[in-house]
Amino acid sequence: MRIHYIIHASFEKLGMIESWIEKNQFQASGTHTYKGEKLPDVSAFDLLILMGGPQSVRKLDQYPYLRDEIALAKNAIQQGKAVLGICLGAQLVGEALGARAEQSPCREVGIYPVHATQEAAADPFFKQLPKAFDVIHWHNDMPGLPKGSVLLASSAGCPRQAFRYGDRVYGLQFHLEITPELMRDMIEHCRDDLKPSDYVQTAEQLVNQDVTAINQKMEKILDYLASCIAKTKVKST
């Protein structure tokens, strides 16, 4: 399987996604669009992963390269590729499907629960999870809900935490991939985001929590997307 990932900041890396790729010996390539690197053709990958970042999709004039990412995601979806958007990436996937990103009612930074919707009980990935489970939040914005998609989760501070479009396109406003090392990097580079608020934890709270169970959920959704791709390849042979 061929994976292409898009990175939006030096401190928002793949986290445990990298170890999952290595464990499965998948091919991987990446684009750092914030450095001006060019995106690949859609034929170059089976799974597209759009990572988080400090940029805002509501300010495309300030970050014009995000328009190219939206176009790539739209093309990938139309070509039947698997697509996973995380945080900023979820907002980009929403935009690719015609749903405008919006400011979230609350800024969320920390480990807080999300609550699955009734529709999540029939979702191939979410049906494996509890009705409420902890995730890592680090956002001010949230994705729109694309027409034809399924809302899968919400939280006390944000009504749109996850959606699915078709059987292999997911947008997760929250993070499941962040490792302790990556958490420390984000704290170092984004301390202004830790200003006290209803759903903002302190740096000390963030670094002292066990993220093992959260990372395991990231592995489950990646395994599911890989299975979708495998089934498609079998059908085409």
Image: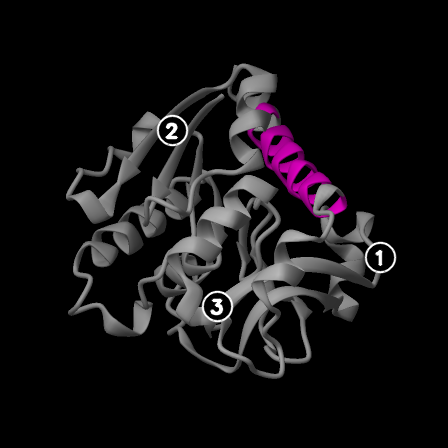
Q: Earlier in the sequence, mark 2 or mark 3?
A: 2
Which residue is at 61% across, 33% downward?
A: 228
Span highlighted in magenta in the image: 213-230
- Colouring chosen for the image of the structure: one colour
Mark 3: secondary structure: strand
Residue type at tag 3: His
Q: Is residue 53 above or below residue 196?
A: above
Q: CA distance from mark 1 to mark 2?
A: 32 Å
* Mark drawn on residue 236: none
Location of mark 3 (residue): 139
Place residue 215 in its image quadrant.
top right
Viewer-nearest of discs 1 and 3: 3
Q: Earlier in the sequence, mark 1 or mark 3?
A: 1
Viewer-nearest of discs 2 and 3: 3
Which residue is at 31% across, 29% downward?
A: 43
Q: Position of residue 103 (x, y in %)?
A: 43, 80
* Mark drawn on residue 45: 2
Q: From this viewpoint, is residue 179 visible?
A: no
* Mark drawn on residue 130: 1
